[in-house]
Amino acid sequence: MRLNNYILLFLAVSILLSCSGTSKIPEGDLLYVGHTIEIEKGKESKKIRKSIESELDGLIRPKPNKSFLGMRPALFFYNVYDTVKKEKGFKHWVKYKLGEEPVLMSEVDLEYNKKVIQNYVENKGFFNAESKADSTRTGKKAKANYQIKLNNQYKIKSIVYPKDSILLSQEINKLKEKSLLKIGKPYDLDQIKNERSRIDASLKERGFYYFNENYLLIQVDSTVANHEVDLILKIKQDIPEKAKNQYKINDIIVYPSFNLKRDTISSKKTDTIKYQDLTIIDNKTVFKPLIFEKTLLFKKGDLYNRTTHNLSLNRLITLGTFKFVKNEFKENDTIKNQLDAYYYLTPLPKKSIQVETLAKTNSANYSGTELNINWSNRNTFKGAELLKISAFAGLEVQVSGQNNGFNVYRFGGEASLTWPRFISPIKMSSGSAYVPNTKALIGYEYQLRTQLYSLKTLNTSFGYIWKENERKEHDLNVVNIAYTSSNNVSDLYKSQIATNASLQKVIDKQLILGTTYSYTYTNTMISNKKNNIYFKGGLDLSGNSTGLILGANDSDNPKSILGVPFSQYTKAEVEFRHYYNFSKETKLASRIIIGAGIPYGNSKELPFIKQFFIGGTSSIRAFRARSIGPGSFNGNDTTNSFLPDQSGDLKLEMNAEFRGQIYDLVKGAVFVDAGNIWLLNEDTEKPGAKFSSKFLNQLAVGTGVGLRFDFNFLILRTDLAFPLRKPYLPQGQEWVIDDISFGNSTWRKDNLVFNLAIGYPF
């Protein structure tokens, strides 16, 4: 019976895939299956022909039905039901979600597409190009065929700029050195349009507030030589007089409590405050004038420029205090060529409370839930300061793995105050589109690991966060203090310490007094690039100033503060990600992480919370969380009760993942992960853990496949992985590819690792 079922399934799939989708094409019509573009070889390079062909592919309409290996299963689903009356339900889903209406040859306008092709190649300088269009039929299918003869491409012989003496012409002439149009280069209408936009943008930086790119005319003379053109840039004669003039900033007026629902400008009950170059008009003094002086970059007498205009608006928006930001410039009534700048700002509610529940996963392969309560005050001291007080409680469990049953309970709170400016004895300024922030924070967390121990952590920090632009961000904590202590240590955990002394450092008191800095660069927000990158580099310094003051230079006799030895170390970590985008839904993502921590002076080793870990749902997925290394050491053999977190001073991790869309909300991935951690110093209890020149021979390697369910508001990720290389096996036996046996239940139990997580791993 089972064999018969397989035969029926095979036949059903075969019928589905073999379906051409032509069975229900209307009489007298054909199924449109696409087009061909043939560009006759001429003097132009193969690269140019390929580029033109690629661009034309995207312009020709309509697009045929999607196909896979020559098959069109979407047409099969569309034809399952002849008519569907309801706009929802199973039939509607099959016909219009799984299915796709056939594209017919009668919908293809060959002459229109021919004109599109002719227009495109002429805009690229092929003024004498010839194009043809026809179609071919095979059975009940048809294809459109386009033939193009480009002939000669015209090139730029000369570029003539305005020669009159008016100020506008003089300023345009100053811009010609950086022109996008170059003598000897091919004529390209897109480049001509881009040049007009460039000149317009540059003039906006030079005070020409009322100028518009449509006031520029670029004439083309193709009679000057054989296959060459002269470009003549002119200012149109009928442009407004004010478009020829430069403007300066006069008065700067701010309405910080503007209400869109009523005319707050004409209200009689207003206070007017003069502060440096600003005039602030408010019903009541809600904001200190200082905040606008720091945020608005225009000064009285400045020449208008578009960059300062946009930066000021963006800084007002990124304050996080205003719901709406509106700006306009008006000509001053009494002073010629002067602009008054008006800013209308609608504040957000000053105080708010937010309650949220989260589903989360972490690097230790734990999944769980968390409740957060956040209270905010967006204008605490009338300077747009943000005060946030939050409390949280959560539970984390390991869905699969050796730590199943050792649940983690967390609760705590945090208070932070953020000033939208630099607070420093050293004068610091930022002219970027983002307001720099000074942030002070204090927090407390209690963590209970059932059957093991509990940890109490108190932390506080003071530092600065600033962005140069949307791609570059800096985070500097000048002061970063953390104190951790333990209690409720179970007999089970104490018994394990007897056999694995490194577990003691998890519950030892730790005091960190240091400075941290991180720099992040990313262009992943740009969706139309072939290559996107993400880089983050961090430096963590602790105990250096304290060690110098107290004379700490002997780790065997460490100096203490209030009876707790303070940590002294330097730690650095860099992460680089690269995304190669084959299409919008298909990409190759890769990542490399390199980290190193060096204890010295007052410390023999890094604090446990600062050490490196590897393995788990967002790391090397073929191994349980924090179970790899260090080096060739096998931490899995150190305990039968629970899996201790293996940690190290050095880290190397590499990942590659091919991602593609399977269907609608479902995406798939194939991945390979590799890496390990190492110790700087020899540890007799962990043979093979020390870093050496043979570190590449100690890499753990794993691979697997996964599904990602994209629900817009969250991405649920499932990965099934298995190891290819186990660094703790005897030398020469580390590669376990030959041992792979999916049909063997024992192999599956020992090697297959299922990961459930939220979000992409990188």
Image (cartoon, rainbow, N blue to C red):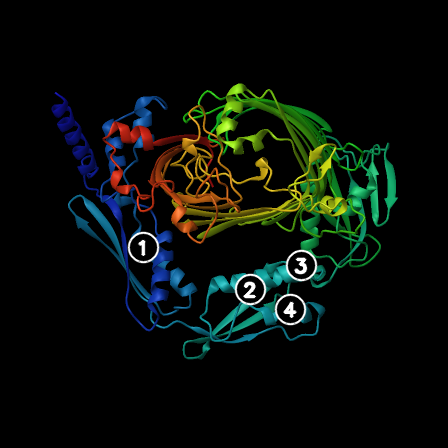
Q: Residues within 10 Å of mark 3 (few under 14, many from 20)?
A: many
- From the viewer's perspective, tell me whether residue 113 is left or right of residue 465: left
- Residue 142, position as x, y percentages in the image: 21, 48
Label 4 amino acid? Answer: Ile
The percent position of residue 44, horizontal first and vertical second, equals: 35, 71
Instruction: Give the mark nearer the N terminus: 4 vs 3.
Output: 4
Q: Secondary structure at mark 1?
A: helix
The foreground one among 161 and 611 is: 611
Picture residue at 60% right of the left edge, 38% below the top: 607
Q: Which residue is mark 2?
A: 195
Residue 753 in picture, x, y percent from top left? 36, 32
Q: CA distance from mark 4 to mark 2?
A: 11 Å
Q: Image point 50% across, 75% down: which residue?
A: 183
Q: Is residue 168 above or below residue 737?
A: below
Residue 87 or residue 556, whichever sits in front: 556
In whole angstroms, how far apart are the C-alphas of marks 3 and 1?
42 Å
Amino acid type, callout 1: Glu
* Residue at the disc numbered 1: 111
Quadrant occupied by the N terminus:
top left
Residue at numbered disc 4 = 172
| Circle nearer the viewer, 4 or 1 | 4
Mark 3 touching mark 1, by CB under 8 A? no
Few, some or many residues within 10 Å of mark 1 (<14, 14–19, 20+):
few
Q: CA distance from mark 2 to mark 3?
A: 14 Å
Mark 1 or mark 3, which is nearer the start of the sequence?
1
Disc on the earlier residue, 4 or 2 = 4
Disc 2 on helix, strand or loop?
A: helix
Q: For mark 3, what is the residue?
A: 204
